[in-house]
Amino acid sequence: MKVKEHSHLRGQNGCLGFFYGLDALLSAYPEGGLPGEFFVNGKTQSIWVWDATGRSWYDSNHAAPAPFFGIITDTNSFSPNVESGKEACFVYIAGHAGSYHFLALKGVSPLTVTTTSAAVIVLVWDGTTWRDYVTPISLDDAVHLSYMYRGSWTESSTYIYADGFTDVVYYLGKYYRVKQAGSVTGEIPDESDKWEEVTHFYAVADQLYFPTGQLIVLDRQQAIRVKGFGSTWELGDGIIHHLETGTFLSTAGELRVPAGGDSEIVISPVERGIKFWRNNKEVLIIDWDNNNQVRLLMSQFDDSGSRELSISPQQITLSQLDSAGQTLNTSQLSLNGLNCRLKQWSDTLVEGDIYVDENNVLKQKRG
């Protein structure tokens, strides 16, 4: 549907146009509407109006908040019980050009509204008088075919008209479309009655080509969605998102993969590593240490703090940390030997423990 230019400004009972579903409208107007605005919803086949108080869109086929009170179905008998000092708004869909007479409006003589095409007519009671607004509309875009541009015409190619799509070709400086349902092969566009010249059209693309360095720019809440074989990828707001699994590439360039429950795997080019998260804590990290050597760090958390195991080409380190993340003790195994804390005789010992007694002698507990 094309909304032609009209005299009233946006926000003064203006029709925003035809949209197939509320999501399509929100893509064009993510900030919402203005008082008095409405649109034609092709999905519900009804008028939706903006509720400025609740800041949401309402289907006029159901109860809606004031000042919108409904759809006019019969101009001759339409006689709303409006009140002085209270605003009210009503919508009538004019299917063709002509004069429409509202014969029974309260407090005024019959009102005539004239339109030169199909239109949305809005009658507004401002509390004292009636005002009318006319938004001419065309349903052409809602019922026309979708065009598939096939480039320059070639004699060997087959062109079709089927399932709401028709092929368009370029031939000797003009564009032609397949005129009737079926297929066309080898028939020259400007000589065959199976073709029809078109002066302008909107095409559905089957391929996209961009010169080097060119960009696709998407406005807010716009997205490119690619779907097939049970897998859907969506590009929007700087994020690439796999809808079925929840995997996404963030605006920071991090690949985030849900791993069930509160677990997540993060591949980060910023922090140069792979991280495994659980309950908002890093339980496994594979990255490079300060010496630019590969490191594997595993952590286990409890109420008292955590225990960490760090493995690098130089050494294996086992650490115990308190709840504030401060290191309590550390043991290291490297090519240079073992550096660790031995148990003391005063510690809790079990069979086989090696410890240092009160005389600083190394012993092993037996019995």
Image (tube, grey):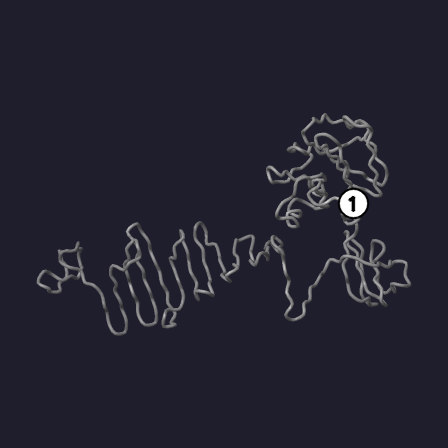
Drawn side of residue 149 relative to residue 309, left or right: right
For label 1, count other residues whose C-alpha is less than 10 Å away and answer few (under 14), some (14-19) or many (20+). Answer: many
Displayed quadrant of residue 227 = bottom right
User: Which residue type does callout 1 highlight?
Assistant: Ile
Name the residue: 82% across, 32% down: 111
Q: Residue 328: x percent and y percent?
A: 25, 59
Residue 107 lies, with reference to residue 22, above or below; the image says: above
Task: Kindly tell me whether residue 1 is visible in this rendering.
Answer: no
Drawn side of residue 121 relative to residue 308, left or right: right
Looking at the image, which residue sits at the far bottom? 336
Q: Residue 160: x percent and y percent?
A: 80, 58
In depth, the one of 175 and 17 nearer the eye is: 17
Drawn side of residue 275 relative to residue 111, left or right: left
Name the residue: 84% across, 66% down: 171
Q: Residue 70: x percent and y percent?
A: 71, 32
Residue 113 lies, with reference to residue 259, above or below; the image says: above
Q: Secondary structure at mark 1?
A: strand
Residue on which the image places disc 1: 137
Displayed quadrant of residue 44 = top right
In depth, the one of 24 and 155 nearer the eye is: 24
Task: Kindly tell me whether residue 147 is visible in this rendering.
Answer: yes
